[in-house]
Image (spheres, grey):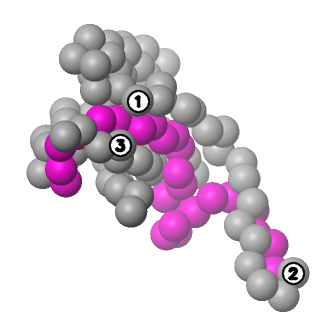
Amino acid sequence: MMTDFLLLFRSDYKTKEVQTSPEVMHVYLTHWQEWYNNLAGQGLLAWPVQRLDPQGKVIRQGNADFDGSYTELNESIVGLTIIKASDYEAAIHLARNCPIFELGGTVEIRHGN
């Protein structure tokens, strides 16, 4: 049975040294499109990739608002999608081919109960 899994993509938007040239970014975005088309072609894409802007706010109790959507120093949630997989192992297998790793990003996988 196939189940929905949320993939959260994180990357560093802030550190100047890890930013890429326009040429590298073009190749990178091509890899994203290929990965996305592969998932869609297999019927494993439940919800298309949603890119997020580098802005954002983190709201905490007590009116503590922070700029950015950062989980660590400069790591930010940059996008998300929902895929179909039989279990966590299958979701991990699909996520391992994600282009986010080409530029040092990470993928968080979540499953609803």
Identity of the residue furthest to the right in this view: 63
* Residue that numbered label 1 is attached to: 46
In depth, the one of 4 and 1 nearer the eye is 1
**Secondary structure beneath label 1:** strand
Expressed as whole percent of the image width and height from the top left, the position of residue 39 reads 27, 22
Residue drawn at the location 40% of the way across and 47% of the way down = 6
Image quarter of the N terminus: top left
Residue 20 in which image quadrant: top left
Res 101 visible:
no
Q: Please report contact status of discs 3 and 1: CB closer than 8 Å, yes or no.
A: yes
Tell me if 10 is positioned left or right of 32 in this view: right
Q: Nearer the viewer, residue 24 or 68?
A: 68
Residue placed at 81% from the left, 80% from the top?
A: 64
From the image, tell me which residue sits under label 3: 4
23 versus 18 height, above or below: above
| Residue 16, above or below 58 | above
Horizontal and vertical percent position of residue 99: 29, 32
Q: Which mark is residue 63?
A: 2
Which quadrant: the C terminus?
bottom left
Magenta segment boundaries in residue numbering: 64-88
| As drawn, 101 above or below 68 | above
Q: Mark 1 vs mark 2: which is more N-terminal?
A: 1
Q: Is residue 66 magenta?
A: yes
Instruction: For marks 3 and 1, give the CA distance.
Output: 7 Å
